[in-house]
Image (spheres, helix red, strand yellow):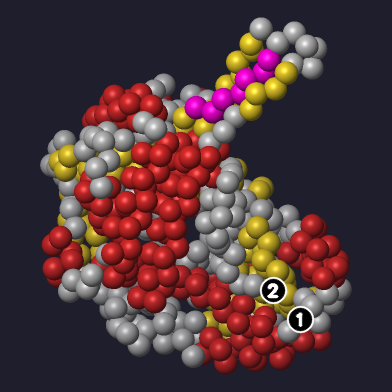
Amino acid sequence: MGSMDTSELIRSVPTDLFLGGEWVPSGNRATFPVHDPATGDVLAEVADAAPEDAMRALDAAVAAGRDWAATPPRERAELLRTVWSKISERADDFALLMTLEMGKALPESRSEVAYGTEFLRWFSEEAVRIAGRYTPAPAGNGRILVTKQPVGPCLAITPWNFPLAMGTRKIAPALAAGCTMLVKPASETPLTLLLLAQIFAEAGLPAGVLSVLPTSRAGDVTGPLLEDPRLRKLTFTGSTAVGRALAEKAGRSLLRTSLELGGNAPFVVFDDADLDAAVEGAVAAKLRNGGEACTAANRFHVANSVREEFVTKLTERMASYRLGPGTDPDTTLGPLINENQKKTVIELVEDAVAGGARVRLGGETPEGPGWFYPATVLDDVPRSARILREEVFGPVAAVTGFDTEDEAIAAANDTEYGLAAYIFTRDLDRALRVSDALESGIVGVNRGVVSDVAAPFGGIKSSGVGREGGTEGIEEYLETKYIALR
């Protein structure tokens, strides 16, 4: 199916709340603007959910919960498969919509559509494989029956950087498990999930199973939900600071909680690495999504014996990226999400340079509208620089050197975060040894892209709890029940 033009697409996307199977305005009729990061212009005005809307959505989720949980797994699976098919048919529309509201270059958006839809297909297959076990009790006095049941109504809070994939990664396993779900999309990028809700409605999803509640007042909307005993799970992707605050609130109700939080991924290049492969991996790990990814390589630890060659090649490769509006077919690096993010990147680069870092590429903000920042390479970054401790969420590669393996491991682990890490080496023993030593939930060995729907995604330390994707992903939405049989 061909893609619509920009204005036609924007007009076709619902801008009301998707609540209890219907499209409705917010209770107080309030709206908020969604901006194009390439220009700062307003794309659309979207319904601004109020606390009473959230409670109506929870009422609907509770009312639909029993029937949805009792729906045969095959039927739940077929519905997810239908949604996968429908989105695939409209892949160009979803890609353009994401580029318009988030800014990423169209090739990046197309990749996200392919990735995000796979969660629907994967969990449609997992829905029919939910299993328990039946065994004799060791004492011989009965039988042990273990079953799995849906957790119940869930609240998902999704980020702006992957508007489709972060939604499907949560919605698909929840619905596959038999849970109902409320989704609060990021206020910067609500349109993609509203279009996704429209596709679910077209596919025949029963009313109340899924509600989408865009809002500019996140705390006002999610706060009452987290205090309501009928809500049984929270899943959140976003910053560590917000994750901690949500976990504290969720803890009062003892909610099941999955948190995918910030990252500060080290990218370690050893002296025996294939440098050309390492550079390609570095570009993928750094510039995917314009650097606005929790798995993005943040700190480049490179063996001093090969550092100059690596930095020279990395600079040449990153210099080939063309900065511009994501809708321009020649663009390979789009704008940042908003003015605040642009200011953060500028501050981190200025702090590093003030401490002695050398700018090998970029580092200067272009003039004109939009929230643009160029691909940037910093070498000789001092250990005191904020950019080595804080998540930059932008197209900046900060390089520092090391001499020994132990030094590299210590530097890589010198962070409160532990989501993703990358290592490049030709030595298999070293690859396994260092992978074991890295304090990270995900390790990429000689590859710069690690996300895979069939693999468990999540971190340790301040990068969160729980896993998404893989066979582990659906377990986050299931309770284990033990039945003792005589």
Residue 446: numbered disc: 2
Residue at the (40%, 39%) spot, across then down: 74
Label 2, label 1: how far apart the Cα atoms are: 9 Å
Residue at the (55%, 60%) spot, across then down: 452
First reached walking from the N terminus: tag 2 or tag 1: 1
- The amino acid type of the residue labelled 2 equals Asn
Picture coordinates of residue 364, whole percent (x, y): 46, 84
Is 449 positioned to the left or the right of 143 in the image?
Answer: left
Quarter in which the N terminus is drawn: bottom left
Q: Are circles 2 and 1 on residues that touch, CB within 8 Å?
A: yes
**For this rendering, which residue is in front, 125 or 234?**
125
Q: Quadrant of residue 104?
A: bottom left
Q: Quadrant of residue 41?
A: bottom left
How crowded pointer 1 is (Cα within 10 Å; few <14, some 14-19, many 20+) is rated as some
**Element under disc 1:** loop
Q: Is residue 467 visible?
A: no
Picture coordinates of residue 64, whole percent (x, y): 30, 28
Q: Is residue 447 visible?
A: yes
- The amino acid type of the residue labelled 1 equals Ala
Picture coordinates of residue 409, whole percent (x, y): 79, 64
Residue 427: numbered disc: none
Which residue is disc 1 drawn over?
273
Picture coordinates of residue 385, whole percent (x, y): 64, 69
Is 24 positioned to the left or the right of 382 in the image?
Answer: left
Which segment did they paint magenta?
Answer: 143-149
**Element under disc 2:** loop
Whether the magenta-drawn stretch holds residue 354 is answered as: no
Residue at the (65%, 58%) spot, across then down: 442
Quarter in which the C terminus is drawn: top right
How crowded pointer 2 is (Cα within 10 Å; few <14, some 14-19, many 20+) is rated as many
